[in-house]
Amino acid sequence: MIKKIYLIGNPNVGKSVVFSRLTGVNVISSNYPGTTVEISKGYLRLRDEKVEVVDLPGTYSLESTSRAEEVAVSLLKEYPKEEIAVINILDSTNLERNLLVTLQLIEEGFPTIVCLNMCDDAGHRGVRIDIKKLEEILHIPVISTCAVTGVGIKLLIDRIGEAVPASRVKLTHEERWKEIGRIVEQVQHLEHRHHTIREILEDASVRPLTGLVMATAVIYASFKIVRFIGESIINKITDPVFFNLFQPLLEKLTLYWQEKGFWFHLLIGDLINGKIDFKQSLGVLTTAPYIEFGMVLPYVISFYFILSLLEDIGYLPRLAILLDNLLHRIGLHGYAIIPVLLGFGCNVPGILSTRVLESKRERFIASTIISIGVPCVPLQAMIFGLLGKFGGFYVGGVYLVLFSLVLILGLILNSTLSGYSPEFLLEIPPYRFPPLQMLGQKLFFRVKGFLIEAVPVVLIGVLIVNILLYFKLFDMITGIFAPVIHGLFGLPKEAIVALAIGFLRKDVAVGMLMPLGLTAKQLFIAATLLAISFPCIATFIVLWKELGLRDLIKSTLIMIIISLIVGAALNFVVLH
Amino acid sequence: MKKLSLVQIKANHKGKITEILGGLNLHQKLMNMGVYKGKEITKLSHIGLKGPVVVKVGRGILALGHGVAEKIIIESE
């Protein structure tokens, strides 16, 4: 009687896709190792019975050498072996390395069934595997699947019940690899294929010169495409909706509004020249939705589209190799580029994914750097929207300041923190072209996640600000902080409202700057400060959870000091 | 036949691993990824002076940090 089904296998073998095929639950799966640090669970109907399916983190072996592997192995031992079935998922294109886990599972007596995934890719690469022969050697069922298209999944479900323990003597490491060599020789047949364009590109991306050229091209193209898609959505969809549909509707509403008191101020905000101005009115129904849906959402969609595409193709590990040298100097290694890139979307998933880094020291450096020097998409979209009209010089300037900060801070942290950063050891997956449907699903979940997290906070944030403004409660705080804001940073004292609201959300904060009529220099300073000072509250909570209170305080102190220094330096020295 | 580390051999050269220096943890990690004494390994490239080394083991491609690559000794023809 099977009570639980576990999916186990190497990272990057399409485990999460098999999982979503089995359970119908959609999980984010990526073409780079280590995404599934969190465990996904779902249910599968097995002969009229609902059985729980658990997707374990990718592991190269049952002898755990990393946190993700430890989790996988301990979960596997949670239930008695008679009550579980283990689906061992293998990448058909790399049978040899994948068989290690298979042999270990059989040796340990787990009722196992082998799922040889990515059969179509193996075919393209001239790898043929004799399934019958492999079944005979292993004495357990072997099913060939291609989870992305769904081939073989039904057969896999039908045969889960056949997962039984097979007997095998326990081997030493060396013996096991020898045995694997023998098995592969018997069941794998390699056909000679000419190098495809894909293989030539795979190879070029891991060589220094061609790799660098490719990385530059990829980053440049990504940036251009993100802007192009974002702007297209704004010009073709969101702006027409806001200006041609929503504005007339709201203006009709205001006509019937006799008394323009508290509620009017709260919902609509100030009228600019007798009309609603989405950028300046600051109402819960005007500026709040415009910031989120009209300025930020289009870029969130385009950013996650490109990031998901690069992930699924398998380009990111290649970028990690190229950047390893640079990142080593700031106490990280190449793989840290993945949390950083995720941080550019939103700092929260960025910091969460620092879990893929091994040491506490690396996680501290990466988290601090992300919350100070990596602006999220909402903040970037607003910076572009606001500073863009003064020219690329200012926008580029913000990035330059942030980039220099990351380098300087990284160098300092690396030389002052005790401990050392471990070396990296990373599998480079082959390029794979994600099916559009899977890509669409992933994009949908990421955008949905953003909306769920952002929209309530934005609405509540604007509401709170409006109440405080209406009752003139900000005047007190502005009085206290005026010397710093005005004297040190050269900003009007009203900007304190924006900087304070930055703790809630960065995009709203920049939105608060819009009606102030700041000069280019003031906007530049304010935008930079918003990026480097406190992270927003969501990021703050995640930092707390991931780093613990002591390191959070340390990280926060660094942020405050840097904000003061950078703000003053920009005001008095650089832009004077 | 000469014994050199993965850092020292040239790109596109192939050889057998004769020794892996370093601690138990590293040994085991490499072992689990199919890198062990006696295994044939091909160096594909070396990124920068102190950068990682990219190798082909079996049908898979691995990137090894510079420090790890220094510890893997190869006997090449």
Image: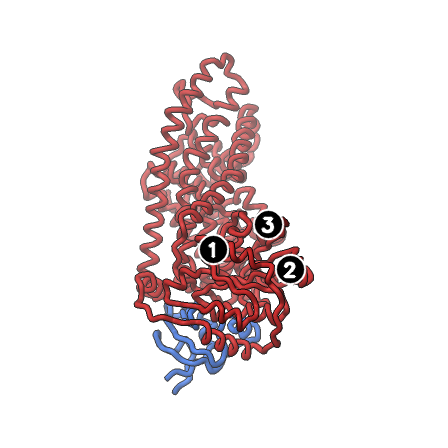
Tell me the kind of residue under disc 1: Ala
Work out which residue is located at the far right of the displayed protein and give it.
A80
Circles 3, 2 touching at the beta carbon (< 8 Å): no
Q: CA distance from mark 3 to mark 1?
A: 18 Å
Residue A235: image location, x then y, percent: 34, 34
Q: Tell me whether marks 3 and 2 sit on the same chain.
A: yes
* Residue B2: image tag: none
Q: Which residue is mark 2?
A: A84
Report the mark closest to the observer, 3 or 2: 3
Q: Which numbered disc flags the more N-terminal residue, 3 or 2?
A: 3
Tell me the kind of residue under disc 2: Ile
Tell me the kind of residue under disc 3: Arg
Which corner quadrant holds the N terminus of chain A? bottom right
Q: Nearer the viewer, residue A138 or A323?
A: A138
Which one of the lettered chains is coloured blue? B
Q: Which numbered disc flags the more N-terminal residue, 2 or 1?
A: 2
Query: Would you say residue A108 is visible in this rendering?
Result: yes
Which corner quadrant holds the C terminus of chain A? top left
Q: How is the image coloured?
A: by chain
Q: Nearer the viewer, residue A4 or A304?
A: A4
> Residue A56 sits in which quadrant?
bottom right
Q: Which residue is mark 3?
A: A45
Residue A46: image location, x then y, percent: 60, 52
> Residue A274 sits in which quadrant?
top left
